[in-house]
Image (cartoon, rainbow, N blue to C red):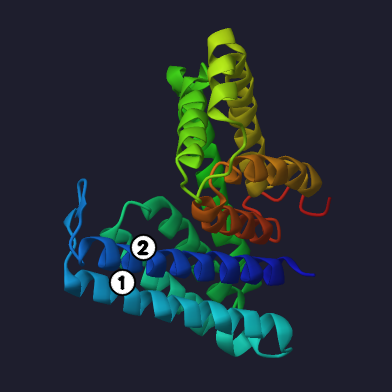
Amino acid sequence: MSAELIAAGCLALAGGWRAALVAADVRHIDRAHGRRAYRPELGWTTARLLTLRRRWAWVGSLAASALVVTLVVPGTAGLLWPLAGATIAIWLARDARLHHGRYTSVCIATLAASVALASFSAAAAGLLASVAAAQLYLVAAIRKLRAADFMSGRVLLDTVAYSVCQAAAGNREFLRLITTCRLAELLERGSLLRACHVAAVATAAAELVVGLGATGLAPVWVTFAIALPMHLAFTLLSPARLMPFTAASLGLLALATTHPLLGIWQHT
C-alpha cells in the first residue's frame, strides 16, 4: 500500500471520527443544557452555533465517507481526493474557532490539504506534509525539553491521575488502566513519579527523532518504529478524544516520507 493511500485512510479515520465527536458534543449540550452551556474562554453556546456545528459535522462525515470510497473503488482518487480534502480542510478551519480542540483541527486540516494536493503533485504533497510533520514533532520536543515541569514527570503524572480519576467516576472517554486505590499506593511510594520522569524524557527524545525523520534526517523504519508505540501510549489515555489527532499525525508522517524536506534517507 502506498504512502498516499495510507494518508488518505488516516484522513478518513481522523475526519470521520472528529465529525462524530462534534456531533456527539452538540447532542450532549442540546440534551443536557438546553442548547445553552458556558465554555471557558469561548463564552455561551447558542442554538445557531450548535446548528452550524452539527451541519458542518455532517459535511465532514460525507467527505470522510468519500475518501473511504477511494480506498475501495479503483480510479476514484483523482476526482474525490481534492474535493474531499478541500471540504474537510474548510470545515475544520471554520470549526477550529468554535472549540478548544484547535491543534487537532489544524493537524487534520493540514493532512486534508496534503491529500488533496497529492492528486496534482505527489512531490508537493510530500513536501507540505514533511514541513508540517517536522514542525509538529520538533516544536513539541523542544517545548518539552525546555519545560522543567514536564521533564520532571509531573505533567505526565497529573495527566495519568486525571485520566484514572475520570475513568473511576464513570467517564467512558477514559480507560480504566488502574484503580484509584492502586494509584494512591503508587503516588505514596513515588514510583509513579519516577516512571513518569522516565516516560517524559523518552517522549521528548522520541519526538525529536520522529521530527528529524519527517525531514528525511532519519531512516523511515526508525521513524515509524518510534512513532507507532509513542502514539499508541499517548492515545491510551483517552482513545475517544485522541484518536483523530493520532490518525492525522501518522498520516502526515506517512506522506512526509515520500518526498521529505531534506531526503537523506528517502531510499532507506
User: As drawn, is 258 to the left or to the right of 84?
Assistant: right
Disc 1 and disc 2 in contact, CB within 8 angstroms: yes
Q: Residue 151, image x and y in percent?
A: 52, 20
How many numbered markers are drawn?
2
Cα separation between marks 1 and 2: 10 Å
Vertical side of 226 occupied by 120: above or below: below
Amino acid type at image mark 1: Arg
In the image, residue 19 lies at what x, y percent?
A: 45, 69
For image coordinates 56% across by 81% down, the residue present is 65
Q: Is residue 81 visible?
A: no
Quarter residue 223 falls in = top right
- In the displayed structure, would residue 78 be above or below residue 20? below
Q: Which of 207 and 22 is in front in this view?
A: 22
Compared with 232, 29 (above or below) is below
Q: In which quarter of the image is the N terminus?
A: bottom right
From the viewer's perspective, is residue 185 above or below residue 62?
above
Instruction: Determine whether the residue tagged by mark 1 lies in a helix, strand or loop.
Output: helix
In terms of sequence position, does the residue under pointer 1 or pointer 2 come before the other? 2
The residue labelled by disc 2 is: 25
Q: Residue at x 56, y 23 (%)?
A: 181
Q: Nearer the viewer, residue 146 or 148?
A: 148
Which residue is painted at 65% across and 90% down in the image?
Answer: 76
The residue labelled by disc 1 is 53
Labels 1, 2: front one: 2
